[in-house]
Amino acid sequence: MVNFGVYVLVTLCASALAAPLVKGGDRIDTSIGARSCHSVSKSVSNRWCNANCNHQPPNCPASLCKCGAPAPPTPPAPPGPATRFYLHAVDVTDHKCFEASSSSKFASKGITDTGKCPASYNTVDKTETVEQCPDGVTSIKYCSPINVTIATKGQALLTEVDDCTSKPLKDGCACGHK
């Protein structure tokens, strides 16, 4: 014959031993979806409730413990701003700058200066995206290719410089500015 009181005590003790250990006394880490539980009976501690109610499978008698809702999961950190790697090459004779960019570091034949084109190259004449190996040399058959966008930039020409010297004075300025 099994004594029911001994069976319950042995079951409760076995569950407490099988439950995960809780660091920091009666507190548990609720950032992983665990419930925060506490004792409603003098026969068990808050630590016992936290450990047993959050155990798989749970052993959480309502007569001994009361639990709150699981903590919401911590949202992932927002992605940082997209960073691009830039190389450029200036063709002074033709007043052009070739600006190559990609989401990862790369090399490109003939476009070797780091960074974007100088600000004086302020018009985009043409843009194309090419598939190439990161080293800029190997055939794409033998690597994991990346997309590189190449912009051909030019310099806008000044059509006429108005130095205001050939016009009569108007309101204190030859050009009519106040």
Image: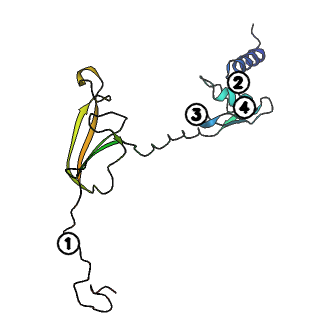
Q: Residue at 33% across / 91% down in the picture?
A: 172
Mark before the other along the chain sequence, 4 or 2? 2
Observer-nearest residue: 1 or 168?
Answer: 168
Observer-nearest residue: 104 or 24?
Answer: 104
Q: Residue at 23% across / 21% down in the picture?
A: 141
Observer-nearest residue: 21 or 133?
Answer: 133
Mark 2: secondary structure: loop
Mark before the other along the chain sequence, 3 or 4? 3
Q: Is residue 170 left or right of residue 41?
A: left
> How would you rate the neighbour count of disc 4 (Cα within 10 Å): few for under 14, some for 14-19, many for 20 or more?
some
> How would you rate the neighbour count of disc 3 (Cα within 10 Å): few for under 14, some for 14-19, many for 20 or more?
few
How far apart are the alpha carbons under marks 2 and 3? Answer: 15 Å
Q: Which mark is residue 32?
A: 3
Q: Nearer the viewer, mark 4 or mark 1?
A: 1
Q: Nearer the viewer, mark 3 or mark 4?
A: 3
Kindly identify which residue carries mark 1: 160
Kindly identify which residue carries mark 2: 21
